[in-house]
Image (tube, rainbow, N blue to C red):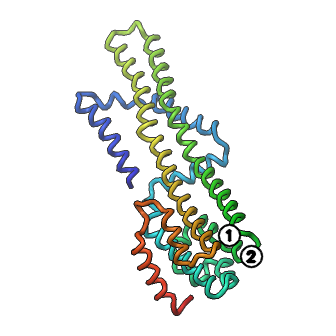
Amino acid sequence: MLVIFGYFIVFASVFGGFALSGGQLGALFQPVEILIIGGAGVGAFIVGNSFKSIRATAKALPRLFKTKKYNKAMYMELLALLYRLLSKGRQQGLMTLEKDIEDPLNSPIFADYPLLLSDPGLMNFVVDYLRLMVSGNLNAFEIEALMDEEIDTCEQEDEVPAHSLSQVGEALPAFGIVAAVMGIVNALAAADRPAAEMGALIAHAMVGTFLGILLAYGCVSPLAALLRQKSFEHLKMLQCIKVTLLSSINGYAPQIAVEFGRKTLYSTERPSFIELEEHIRNVKKASTTGV
């Protein structure tokens, strides 16, 4: 929703300002210029990316128009889930978690957190490292190194769509100049026409430069920046899980472990110590008959 609202402000400001200054909006509508710039941008995007990158970018675009996913409520759910899992493992033994991590969809613990279950990547990260903890074959340093490697891989994968869009955004002003030069060439080829017609042809040519810059800095580049922001939020969730699980492996109680995880979160979404403590207290009450 914010993306659409932002686009509305961009186009209303640019075209509205042009109209208020006495400009004719019809003069800016140049389908040929749009075809040259848009077609060249799409073509360059295809040439500069593998099929896997193109598919990843297409898959990432719909996320840009959705509301914020990783918010305070989801962080609270994540910390509560980790607390319940670690508490069960501490009280009943890690082996009792085997059924939960082998089939999270049918686990009574995981079932209480549908918001987290809707994120397969996040759940796989949690389940995979709980499985390693249950096996008991790795020490904390080995698991931490493996977590860092996986988080780094996730960061590289998340960067692919953002980098692809960023490259297109950087190229669009140049394609706008290409369209403008072609328009100037067309105008000079008709130098024998009246001055009024020549002026119109040159004005149409200059629209290419305008459109290239507008599409680059008003449309495409902001999307690349937003993708990077969403990637950082996703990685922060993984880092929170990493710190919490490692704290538990190092012998800290579940409530202390989730406190360590809480401290890694962004301050804008991070629950306070009191909020987390109250939430965990409620979780304890609710799980006395379950876990």
Q: Nearer the viewer, residue 206 or 105?
A: 105
The amino acid type, in three-letter code, at marker 2 is Ser
Q: Can you identify the residue that label 1 sits on?
A: 128
Position of residue 110 measured from the top left corner of the image (x, y, whole percent): 57, 78
User: Residue at left 60%, top 84%?
Assistant: 88
Residue 267's place in the image compared with 74, above or below, is above
Q: Position of residue 137 (x, y in %)?
A: 76, 72
| Mark 2 to mark 1 CA distance (whole Å) | 11 Å
Q: Is residue 211 above or below residue 115?
A: above
Q: Residue at x 42, y 63 (%)?
A: 269
Percent across and percent down for residue 237 are: 54, 63
Residue at x-position 74% and y-position 76%: 135
Q: Which residue is mark 2?
A: 135
| Count of marks overlaid on the render | 2
> Could you say where residue 136 lies in the image, as x and y percent from the top left?
74, 75
Q: Secondary structure at mark 2?
A: helix
